[in-house]
Image: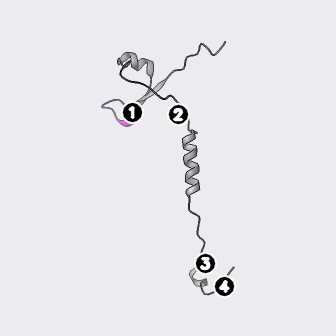
Amino acid sequence: MGTDNIRKTILVLVQWMGILLEDTSWEKWESLKINYNLEDKVVLEAQRNVMNENTELETKAKEEKEHRRTKMVISKPWYLEDYATK
């Protein structure tokens, strides 16, 4: 059985009007297009897997954040300030 006949299902995250933000839902794009007559009203330009936690942008942001961390400054306790220590 080849993978040529398998069609990808595009899901879109929908925030329904009048419903709480927590109740957004993933819906099939084809169903929404047909049921709400969105064929020529909405254009989906970019298609990527937004449910993958290890995206390049997140990884890059984590690396930059780690790089920007300040170094810990180690200083002598106040009671040793008059003494020479290594």
On the rendered structure, is 79 left or right of 22? Answer: right
Q: Which residue is denoted by mark 3 in the rendering?
A: 76
Q: Is tag 4's residue or tag 1's residue first in the polypeptide sequence?
A: 1
The amino acid type found where label 3 is placed reads Lys
Q: Is tag 4's residue or tag 3's residue first in the polypeptide sequence?
A: 3
Q: Helix or strand or loop: what does disc 3 sit on?
A: loop
- Of 43 and 71, the residue lying toward us: 43
Q: Which residue is denoted by mark 2 in the rendering?
A: 51
Asked if marks 4 and 1 touch (Cβ < 8 Å), the reply is no
Residue 48 in the image: state x and y as whole percent. Answer: 52, 30
Badge 2: residue crowd in 10 Å (few <14, some 14–19, many ≥20): few
The range drawn in magenta is 14-23
Q: Which residue is denoted by mark 4 in the rendering?
A: 84
Asked if marks 3 and 2 touch (Cβ < 8 Å), the reply is no
Q: Residue at x 66, y 13 (%)?
A: 2
The amino acid type found where label 2 is placed reads Met
- Of 52 and 48, the residue lying toward us: 48
Q: CA distance from mark 2 to mark 1?
A: 17 Å
Q: Which residue is denoted by mark 1 in the rendering?
A: 23
The amino acid type found where label 1 is placed reads Asp
The amino acid type found where label 4 is placed reads Ala
Query: For the C terminus, which image quadrant?
Result: bottom right
